[in-house]
Amino acid sequence: MLIGKRGAASSAISTADFERVTVRGRDLAADLMGSVSFTDFFFFLATGRLPSVEQRFFLDLALVAIAEHGLTPSVQAARMTYAADPSALQGAVAAGVLGCGTVVLGTADLARVLIDEVLARIDAGASPDEAAEQIARERRAAGRPMPGFGHPLHKPADPRADRMIALARERGVAGRGVDCATRLTGAVARAWGKPLPMNVSMAIAATLRDLDVPASLVRGVPILARTAGLLAHLGEEAEAPIGFFMASQAEAAIGYVGEAPP
């Protein structure tokens, strides 16, 4: 039984035969290997075209910015999974990637949607400041979060976000996305009654939007980046294991409040 709408039974990404691997109409070995970086190839795989100089620069910047952030929940899940089965590296990586969701790491695409909401109101006649204020007040009143703002550790500013925005301005690529993100920063602080710093997810969303990087790549960037970080942690776990130690510390820290047996 088919579920959902069936698409065309075809793919435009890649095919392979005994002679060559063809990717988006180009010979992988003859045309691409040795000629493009992995960032170039990532963009090419997703879009069918190579990135511009600035698209490559800011994709690289985003991947570096978000690949590593210490012993995050996704890293802990990966290291403890690896400790339980060192033969299943892929399972440990998968465990970490599964922790990349809308609360931790996966808000860049939601931040991009938020920017689009502000721009839609501007295009409908609101001033940029009015649009940002409206969105912030409405979300605050409805108890909805503001993706791309706030961070449990980086206060009063996320240094990664500040660096990305500064480079976008320095390189002359900051546009409506960066402008919206900046205006939202002030609007969010007023609506919440306290500063909520722009975090790296909003900076990624804003800069990549201004560079016409497809939205489909924005959600994938944190997952791709964090996979590199997970692999580094798992390499260290193999040499200097802490997975079981972290598990024991968690067990010791969480008190049992259930009933005692009769």
Image: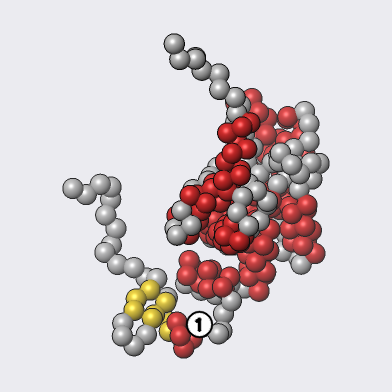
Displayed quadrant of residue 88: bottom left
Residue 119 screen position, x and y as percent:
63, 47
Q: Is residue 3 left or right of residue 67?
A: left
Task: Name the residue located 71 percent from the left edge and 41 percent from the top edge.
Answer: 151
Q: Residue furthest top?
A: 262
Answer above or below: position of 35 versus 6: below
Q: Which residue is at 28% across, 47% downward?
A: 4
Identify which residue, 134 or 27, lies in the foreground: 27
Left/right of residue 87 with respect to residue 144 in the rendered view = left
Residue at the front extreme of this rendering:
262
Q: Indicate the quadrant containing the C terminus: top left, top right, bottom left or bottom right.
A: top left
Q: Quadrant of residue 168?
A: bottom right
Q: Label 1 crowding class (10 Å Cα cut-off): few <14, some 14-19, many 20+?
A: some
- Res 90 visible: no
Image coordinates for residue 75, horizontal then vertical, percent = 59, 50
Question: In this rendering, is residue 152 above or below 240?
Answer: above
Q: Quadrant of residue 137?
A: top right
- Indicate the amino acid at tag 1: Leu
Kindly tell me whether residue 242 is visible in this rendering.
Answer: yes
Residue matched to label 1: 32
The residue at the point 73 percent across, 29 percent down is 192
Colouring convention used in this rendered image of the protein: secondary structure
- Secondary structure category for the residue under label 1: helix
Placement of 28 over or under 258, stated as above or below: below
**Measuring 60% from the left and 28% from the top, which residue is drawn there?**
254
- Counting from the top left corner in percent of width and height, residue 160 is at 74, 54
Q: Nearer the viewer, residue 1 or 252?
A: 252
Q: How many marks?
A: 1
| Of the pair 68 and 53, the residue shown nearer to us | 68
